[in-house]
Image: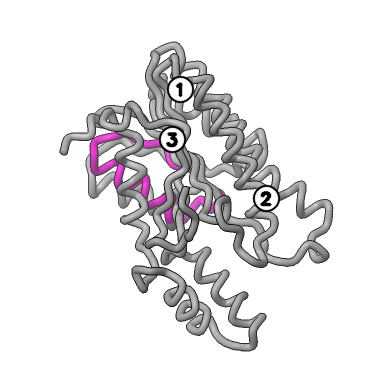
């Protein structure tokens, strides 16, 4: 299936590893040129070179912290200076610390808000005018299954990814007349560094190990296993494509059936 992404320009945040890297690799495999960003410069540079070698597309890497406005500005300016446009925006970030309500300070709430919500708003604000002018664009936000079924111990993520969902659902209606779609992708338990970190924390809290946490999650997932980043990335590539032109305002789970709700 030709997804119609050749020579499109995609900006993917937090894309040096994990889900962000998998999405960047999938878009590049479909012929899209990339702007990738993350805070860790060395890992990001290696990822960008790997994608260039594998796909042959143009990949620009920008070391930046998009939880800060200066980082958002640097990434957006680099993308527009190099390519003159951004057709596809994928907002993604690491997760905030796990914990209970009593363990979170006001500063932790503020930091998580910048990381999960303000980064999405800032990147969207930077690329949306061009999408509207060209009357074509795709905005994809990586959120979490927690927005439909909150996960114990992840109050910051549960709260702020739900805020992103509300933002995106409202924006989708505003942008529909301009042929700009806005959708959210909800990863379930997927084999990434972040999930391994959560497994270690969960195991320690219960007096067990990370392997115990993985076993518990696998029992909760109807498919009986964790997902792989490439499985998640396949949905992102489709939603970014011409073939997904009538899908907007949706939050779609890639979770092996973990969410139990009807909708």
Any mark on residue 11, and which?
3
**Viewer-nearest residue: 95 or 161:** 161
Position of residue 17 measured from the top left corner of the image (x, y, whole percent): 43, 56
Q: Is residue 132 magenta?
A: no
Which circle, 1 or 3, is nearer the viewer?
Answer: 3
> Residue 142 location in percent, x, y?
49, 46
Q: Residues within 10 Å of mark 3 (few under 14, many from 20)?
A: many
Q: Dot 2 corresponds to which residue?
A: 159
Q: CA distance from mark 1 to mark 2?
A: 35 Å
- Could you tell me if residue 160 is visible in this image? yes
Mark 2 surroundings within 10 Å by alpha-carbon count, few (fewer than 14), some (14 through 19), many (20 or more): some
Q: Which residue is mark 1?
A: 81
SS label for mark 1: helix
Q: Nearer the viewer, mark 1 or mark 2?
A: 2
Quarter holding the N terminus is top left
- Asked if the magenta segment contains residue 41, the reply would be yes
Task: Say which residue appears at 46% left-offset and 59% top-offset.
Answer: 188
- SS at circle 2: helix
- Given residues 92 and 42, the one toward you in this image is 92
Q: Is residue 79 above or below residue 188?
A: above
């Amino acid at each position: 299936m030709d997804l119609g992404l050749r020579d499109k320009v995609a900006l993917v945040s937090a894309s040096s590893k994990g889900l962000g890297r998998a999405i960047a690799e999938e878009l590049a495999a479909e012929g899209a040129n990339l702007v990738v960003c993350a805070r860790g410069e060395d890992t990001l540079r290696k990822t960008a070179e790997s994608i260039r070698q594998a796909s042959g597309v143009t990949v620009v890497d920008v070391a930046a912290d998009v939880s800060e406005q200066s980082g958002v500005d640097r990434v957006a300016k680099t993308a527009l200076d190099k390519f003159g446009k951004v057709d596809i925006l994928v907002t993604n970030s690491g997760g905030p610390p796990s914990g209970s309500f009593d363990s979170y300070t006001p500063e932790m709430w503020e930091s998580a808000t910048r990381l999960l919500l303000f980064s999405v708003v800032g990147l969207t604000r930077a690329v949306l005018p061009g999408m509207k002018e060209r009357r074509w664009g795709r905005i994809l936000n990586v959120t979490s299954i927690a927005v439909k079924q909150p996960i114990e111990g992840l109050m910051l993520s549960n709260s702020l990814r739900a805020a992103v969902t509300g933002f995106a659902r409202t924006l989708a209606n505003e942008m529909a007349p301009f042929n700009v779609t806005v959708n959210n992708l909800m990863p379930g338990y997927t084999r990434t560094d972040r999930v391994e970190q959560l497994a270690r924390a969960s195991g320690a809290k219960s007096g067990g190990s990370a392997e115990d946490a993985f076993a518990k999650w696998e029992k909760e997932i109807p498919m009986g296993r964790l997902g792989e980043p490439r499985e998640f990335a396949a949905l992102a590539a489709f939603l970014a494509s011409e073939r997904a032109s009538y899908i907007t305002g949706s939050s779609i789970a890639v979770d092996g059936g973990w969410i139990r709700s009807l909708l």
